[in-house]
Image: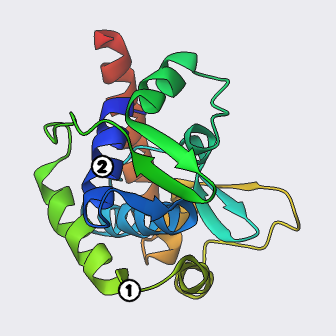
Amino acid sequence: MDIERLIQVVYYILKKYDNTLNYTKLIKLLYLADRKAIDETDSSITGDRYVAMNNGPVLSELYDLIRNRDVKNKKHQDEWNKYFQKDDNNITVKNENISDDKIPLYAFNILDEIDEKYHNYNYGHMINVVHVECPEWEYPKGTSIPIKKEKILKHLGRNETQIKAIIAEDKAFEKEFAYYK
């Protein structure tokens, strides 16, 4: 996952809410945006992994960053903490020195479209939305269950051949990207 891109995407959304937003709503908006991007481009905007939790699908690393629990990657947590803080149930921007150069051009339209559709929804409404509109989510009974991209693609109408091709392309890209790190 590209922490710079994630920070930029979160900031892009938070600017639409005067730099503060309920973190559950933020997570749901970004899940819906990633899902739409996967449908349209076969790629997510954030590059995060997904899990099913009681309140719906969650961007796993984003959730850990918000809760200051990204123990897997302290550098990501330190970077996140430079720009955002959690106050009760809200995420607030504390440093506005954030560009948008890592956000793919197609993503702006998707982020704007998702925000426009759900801007006036509160976090409770957003939980209901993802429970209804995201059939890949299943109730995890108080734990978390990974939501694989294959499952999202299947629920978006891709057949097995298409899904295998998309996942193979993802793996090839990851391998190539890892080579240049």
Q: Amino acid at mark 1?
A: Asn
Residue depicted at x 77% and y 55%: 144
Check disc 1: other Cα within 10 Å, few if <14, some if 14-19, many if 20+.
few
Q: Is residue 92 above or below residue 32?
A: above
Residue depicted at x 63% and y 30%: 70
Q: Is residue 30 above or below residue 63?
A: below
Q: Nearer the viewer, residue 105 or 82?
A: 82
Judge left or right: residue 99 versus residue 153. left
Check disc 2: other Cα within 10 Å, few if <14, some if 14-19, many if 20+.
many
Q: Position of residue 160 (x, y in %)?
A: 49, 64
Residue depicted at x 31% and y 21%: 176
Q: Nearer the viewer, residue 124 or 179?
A: 124
Whether residue 79 can be seen here: yes
Q: Amino acid at mark 2?
A: Tyr
Q: Assign a secondary structure to mark 1.
A: loop
Q: Nearer the viewer, residue 31 or 121?
A: 121
Q: Is residue 135 above or below residue 180?
A: below
User: Which mark, by number, is residue 11?
Assistant: 2
Answer with mark 2 or mark 1, whichever residue precedes in sequence.
2
Locate the C terminus and report the quarter of the image it occupies. Answer: top left
Q: Position of residue 26 (x, y in %)?
A: 46, 62
Q: Assign a secondary structure to mark 2.
A: helix
Write down the residue under mark 1.
120
Whether residue 160 can be seen here: no
